[in-house]
Amino acid sequence: MTKSRILLGAAMVALALGAVAKTATANRLDDARAVFHEADELYAGGHYGQAAQKYEAAYKILRSPVVFFNIAQARRLQFKAEGGYKNLVAARRYYERFIAEANPDPAHRARAQANLEEVKESATKEARRQFAAAEKAVRLSRFTAAIDGYAAAYELWPQPALLFNLAQAQRKQFTVDHHLDRLAKAEDLILTYRREGKGEVAAATLDEILTEIRGQRAEYQRRREAESRASEPRAMAEARRLYRLGDGKKAVAALARAEKVEGIKTVALVQLYRLKGQAAALAGDATLAVAAFERYLALEPAAKGVGLSEASLPYFEAAQTFWKGKTPLAIDHLP
C-alpha cells in the first residue's frame, strides 16, 4: 500500500490502533492489524468492494472514525470501476463522517473534502441518469423500473419533488400487481412530500391524491372480501351474519370454529382475523380485539384500517403499535 493509494496510510492506521490501545487486548489489536492488512492488499489489487467490506470490519474492531476515510476511498473507486450508485451514496456518507467525527489535520481534511466534492458531482450526474431512466420506464409502463430509478435518484440527490414521482409510480404499479404495500408507500411518500416539498404540487392536488389512495384501499378490501367468501368455511359466513345482527359474542364463537377448519386459505384467514377484531370490539372484549388485529396485520402488514367499524379502530391502532418496528409475515396478494 502506498500513501498515494490510501491517504491515511500506515501512520493514520497507527493512530486508529492507538485510539483503542489503552483498553484493547493484544488479540484485538492483532485482529485489527490483520484485517487492515487484508483490506490494503485487496485495495492495492483493485478489489475495492471487498476492501471496503474489510475496512468496515476493521471499524467494528477499532471504533475509530479515521477508518471512515479508507471506506470512503474504496467505495469511491469501486463506483469508478464498477458503477453501482450505492457506492457513491456510501462514499459520500463516509467522507462526511470522517470530516465531522475524525478531527483530521488540515491536509487530510482538505483531501477528504476534495474527494467529497468529486463524489457529490458524480452523484448529481448519476441522479440525472437514474431520473431519465425512470421517466422512460413510466412512458413504457414499466413501473417497477420507474420505482427503482426514482428511488435511486432520490438517494443520490434528495430533492422532495422526487418523492412525488416515486409515489405516483407506486400507485401505477398497484394497478398492475395489487400489492397493498404499494399504496402504503405511496401514501407515506405523499405525506412526506407535503411536509418537505416546495409547493411544486398544489396542496389541493395532494389532498385529492390521498383521497384517491383511500378509495383504492377500499376497493382492494372489497375484492379481498369477495375472494374470501368464495372459499371461506361456513362458520365464517355465519359469523358475518351474526356480526351484522349486532351479536358480537356469537360472531366470535363462530369465528373460533372457523379457525379450526383445516386447509383454510390465507385470503380467508386474513378476513377472519379482520372480522374477529371487529366482532370482539362489538362484544366489548378489548384483549381479544387487539390480538385478532395483531394477527390480521401479521398477514396484511400494509393495512390501514379502511372500512373497519368505528368501535374497533382503537384496537386496530393498538395492534399497529405492537407491530411498529417489527417485521410481520408476507402473503401473496390478488393476481
Image: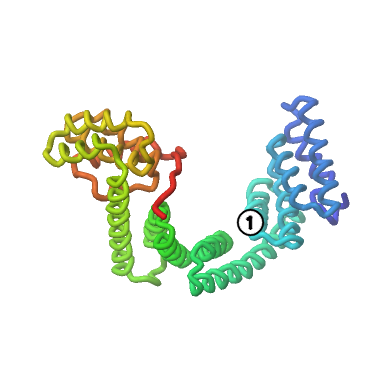
From the top left corner, tell me how far across and down residue 190 is, in percent: 38, 60
Which residue does the image show at 78% across and 40% down from the upper left? 15
Name the residue at the right extreme: 2
Foreground pick, 212 / 254: 254
Q: Is residue 196 visible?
A: no
From the top left corner, tell me how far across and down residue 47 is, in percent: 80, 52
312 left or right of 66 in image: left
Determine which quarter of the picture holds residue 264.
top left
Under mark 1, the amino acid is: Lys
Q: Which residue is mark 1?
A: 86
Name above or below for residue 330 compared with residue 183. Answer: above
Q: Is residue 39 visible?
A: yes
Which residue does the image show at 58% across and 62% down from the upper left? 156
Which residue does the image show at 24% across and 42% down from the upper left? 313
Q: Which quarter shows the C terminus?
A: bottom left
Q: Secondary structure at mark 1?
A: helix
Name above or below for residue 277 compared with residue 332. Answer: above
From the top left corner, tell me how far across and down residue 232 is, in percent: 30, 41
Foreground pick, 314 / 161: 314
Name above or below for residue 209 compared with residue 24. Answer: below
From the top left corner, tell me how far across and down residue 308 is, in percent: 24, 45
